[in-house]
Image (cartoon, rainbow, N blue to C red):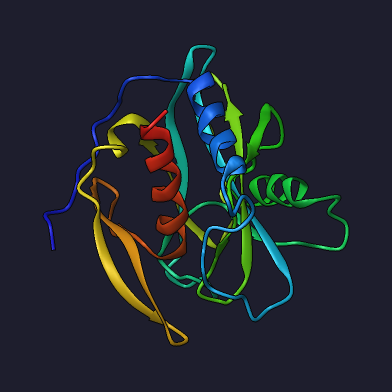
Amino acid sequence: MKSPWRPPADGPTVPWPRIAESLRRPQLGPNPHKLSPRIPENPRRAAVGVILWGDSAGASKVVLVQRGHGAPQHAGEVAFPGGMVEPGDRDLPDTARREVAEELGITGGLWELGCFPDGVAKAQVRFTPVFFRWEEPTPRFTLDRELEQALLLPLEPLLEAPWTLERLDRHGLNLEVPRLELAMDSLAAPLWGATAFVFKAWLDVLKGC
């Protein structure tokens, strides 16, 4: 295991056109709607919000959350805000917006950038990553009681962070899943599992744009 990575406070801005290109390229590939080879057992769908915070020049940070240690699902894990589709949701981006509002208190100022191919969570649910541009001058969060904290990680440094690969067996399917050991003043936990699988796949596309 590599030493934990302590992210810098800030990093270079990633221009919005470069981010837009990173979301366009997968749509031209052979599997534009599904990233994971796993077959979900649960027919319900879910969505997560990938919030990129920055200004008119581009994105400088990405918003993640740490689940509360007593949360009924994914206790203590680092993830994107999100959850299951509810009957009143218009579509998957609407699900992501609702979950972001419920978990982080962000109810406005989110510009939808597009979606990345779906992942499959360990709960055997297919989830869609919906990307948002957020230019709030001073990020503020009102956390859901099931969350421990919100995290703002610098985006560009994540491209060169010391990611490793972890071999997992999920219902008979052997997977190599990225893992990043995070060390921050308020957190010492890995970024791993389905969140890391999707996040690192997007970072790899972004790096080539």
Q: Position of residue 153 (x, y in %)?
A: 36, 38
Left or right? Give the position of 157 relative to 51.
Answer: left
The residue drawn where x is 24% and y is 52% is 163
Q: Position of residue 64 (x, y in %)?
A: 46, 47
Left or right? Give the position of 32 relative to 165.
Answer: right
- Seen from the viewer's position, the closer of residues 100 and 46 is 46
The residue drawn where x is 47% and y is 73% is 70
Asked whether residue 139 appears in the rendered view, the answer is no
Res. 159 image quadrant: top left
- Seen from the viewer's position, the closer of residues 178 and 37 is 37
Asked whether residue 31 appears in the rendered view, the answer is yes
Q: Position of residue 148 (x, y in %)?
A: 45, 57
The residue drawn where x is 59% and y is 75% is 39
> Which quarter of the rendering shows the C terminus?
top left
Left or right? Give the position of 128 relative to 21.
Answer: right
Q: What residue occupies the far front of the structure in this picture?
A: 30
> Which quarter of the rendering shows the N terminus?
bottom left
Q: How many numbered callouts? A: 0
- Seen from the viewer's position, the closer of residues 31 and 115 is 31
The vertical placement of 112 against 151, above or below, is: above
The residue drawn where x is 58% and y is 76% is 124
The vertical placement of 116 against 10, above or below, is: below
Q: What residue occupies the far top of the structure in this picture?
A: 57
Q: Position of residue 27 (x, y in %)?
A: 62, 42
